[in-house]
């Protein structure tokens, strides 16, 4: 079973770089699991329809530092299961 450590900053960069479904395939988990991981680490995700729009202004991307409630870096270990879930 493959394990990958993913910091809050790395997850933030991934979810604002490409769709959750692509990230999920790369990590070997479901897109729902990626969403739950974002919730757990308090990583904001783009709004619904963000990737369907033709232009995405850089100003629309929030900074991770502006999110209250978390200070510093937190690492989350994701382990994939044969059923596509994650272990925390």
Image: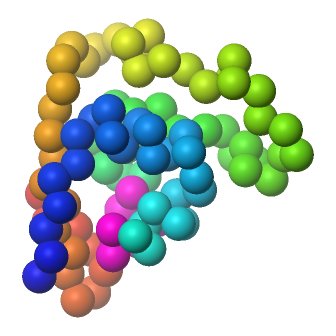
For the point 46% across and 62% down, the residue is 23
Q: Nearer the viewer, residue 77 or 88?
A: 77
Establish if 51 lies above or below 70.
Answer: below
Q: Which of 17 and 86 is in front in this view?
A: 17
Residue 6, image x, y percentages: 23, 48
Task: Judge from the rendering whether residue 64 lies leftward or rightward of residue 85; answer left or right.
Answer: right
Establish if 40 lies above or below 79.
Answer: above
Can you tell which quarter of the image residue 58 is in? top right
Residue 32 showing in the rendered view:
no
Residue 8, image x, y percentages: 28, 35
For the point 44% across and 74% down, the residue is 25
Main SS, magenta region, reads: helix
Establish if 19 lies above or below 45.
Answer: below
Q: Give the range drawn in magenta.
A: 27-34
Number of marks in the image? 0
Task: Judge from the rendering whether residue 54 lies leftward or rightward of residue 88; answer left or right.
Answer: right
Q: In the rendered image, which quarter contains the C terminus? A: bottom left
Q: Does the magenta stretch include residue 30?
A: yes
Residue 55 showing in the rendered view:
yes
For the point 21% across and 75% down, the residue is 80
Establish if 62 lies above or below 43.
Answer: above
Q: Is residue 63 magenta?
A: no
């Amino acid at each position: 079973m493959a394990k990958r450590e993913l910091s809050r900053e790395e997850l933030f960069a991934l979810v604002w770089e490409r769709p959750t479904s692509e990230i999920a395939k790369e990590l070997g988990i479901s897109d729902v699991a990626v969403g739950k991981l974002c919730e757990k680490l308090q990583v904001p995700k783009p709004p619904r329809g963000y990737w369907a729009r033709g232009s995405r202004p850089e100003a629309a991307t929030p900074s991770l530092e502006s999110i209250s409630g978390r200070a510093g870096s937190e690492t989350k270990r994701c382990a994939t299961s044969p059923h596509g879930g994650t272990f925390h």
